[in-house]
Amino acid sequence: MMLIWLIAFPFLGGLLAWFCARFSSKAAHFISLLVLAFSIGAIFLAWQQGESSTSMEDLWMLQWRWMWLPAWGIEIHFGLDGLSFVLLLLTYVMGFIAVMVSKNQISHNIGLFHFCLLWMVSGVAGILLSLDLFLFFIFWEVVLIPLYLMVVMWGHKNRVFATVQFFIFTQASGLLLFLSILALVFVHHAQVGVYTFDYDQLINTSLPYPLAIWILLGFLLAFLVKLPAFPFHVWMPPLFAESMCAPLLVGIMVKTGAYGLLRFVLPLFSSDIHLIAPWMTVLGIVSIVYGAILAFAQNDPFKILAYSTLSHMGLILIGIFSQDKLALSGVAVLLVTQALSTGGLLMLFAHLKTSLPDLDLQKVGGLFKVVPGVTVLSLFFVMASVGLPGLGNFVGEWLVLLGIFSTNTISAAFAASGIVLGAIYSLWLVQRLFYGAYKGGMHTTISDVSAGQKALYGFMVLLLIGIGFFPAPLLDVVSTVWQEKAPDIDEEIL
């Protein structure tokens, strides 16, 4: 039952926050923080409970299932392992941070905003815990509704175009995902005579060629759109620029694409991955280089970070399809650290945009003189995102590069070049925005980060430093997940 409450509690808390906002916006804010803090404690409790009740042979630390539609073999089946634990914890933490930041940025329909935010957190939790593919698809689609509302109601002037474009891409990819799930279920039924959407059953399905490739492509395209990877990334820059929930996109939504590749594509199609792995490596390389080049061409800091995210996701894509255990562990680390570093930058830039609605690098500069706190924090998060040794991103990038190098040295070289380009455009962004002649508008009041906000960002800083110097706890949690996903790699390298 614990796993059900991890999903239900944020949603119910969001309803309560929406209701209480009629009487007090502070009450809604407090309820959201309390719900997410309780959820963070609950996920640790669930993990501890799973550790004490499972053996090393068990694939899932904790499970709960209930037959929903027996005729079609559809269950409410949830499961927790190291990968879902780490990403679920990241989801709750980023949700908590988003609530804290929203206090100074959301001024209307506050109750509805908190409901949508907690609804999205609840939906992503459902994605990460679902082991029934029909249930997974429901959460995959439902989570788009609160995101749509958040962008349309609290976005900027071109928010409608950005949202509609995102919705078209995700709905088209969702249709492919649903058709692929159905095809997999029908093939399984033809082999064993039983309808089921259960992950543990479908993973043993023997798919004939070339049908296996078509089903694989359906899953793959759905997850590449959400990742995103080139050329399915076009929804991301406008949404970053027009949305106030961009940190949630980086910290929560984008990670579901990588999770789908790790959880479903690699295990379900393990015998066919080698046929598409070289193409995915090429796609990852193109994403890295293309994202870095376009980042140089932008004057909007949000779009620079959007293309930076595209470049980072290219590295993650190569790491996933290398199927090397070191690279896969590095991918898990990067999913966490990139959410913190890029999410931190997006929140700081959103803070600036409240005072400077036209945040354009051709019009704004020299902000160090008026917002030294924002400058120092931005410089730290930039150093983290470019992989400065001693910070969490460095651990993830090093493991991914080491794993890729053991399988393909050319891919490793291109991946490393992307990291170098990332360092150049990130430092170039800081130089243009915060240093040089002041161009912020002498009559514009620009507030620096408050003491409370400094404490919030300080927590994110400590997490990145902690992972950088002590990555072992995080690696220990996720390393056992790769046993079934990359069995051909020598155990001794870990």
Image (cartoon, rainbow, N blue to C red):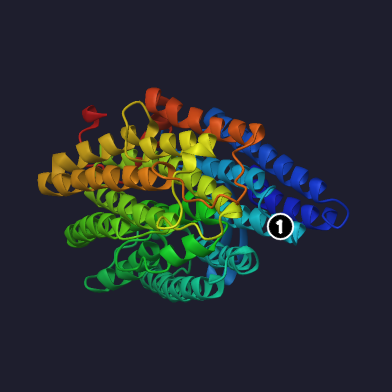
Image position, residue 105 (x, y; %): 66, 52
Closest to the observer, 354 or 186: 354
Closest to the observer, 407 or 444: 444
Q: Secondary structure at mark 1?
A: helix
Residue drawn 25% across the image and 42% down it: 487
Image position, residue 409 (x, y; %): 11, 44
- Tell me if mark 1 has few (under 14), some (14-19) or many (20+) residues whose alpha carbon lies within 10 angstroms of its own: many
Closest to the observer, 268 or 114: 114
Residue drawn 80% across the image and 51% down it: 25
- Residue 249 in the image: above or below residue 181: above
Left or right of 15? Residue 52 is left
Quarter of the image with the N terminus is: top right
Residue furthest to the left in view is 410
Left or right of 437? Residue 120 is right
Any part of residue 417 in sight: yes
Instruction: Quadrant for residue 331, please give it.
Output: top left
Quarter of the image with the C terminus is: top left
Identify the amino acid type marked 1: Phe
Which residue is identified by label 1? 115
Left or right of 83? Residue 69 is right
Image position, residue 467 (x, y; %): 42, 29
- Residue 486 in the image: above or below residue 131: above
Residue furthest to the right in view is 23
Closest to the observer, 487 or 382: 382
- Residue 142 in the image: above or below residue 131: below
**Marker count (numbered):** 1
Residue drawn 72% across the image and 46% down it: 32
Image position, residue 113 (x, y; %): 69, 58
Left or right of 89? Residue 261 is left
Instruction: Quadrant for residue 297, please give it.
Output: bottom left
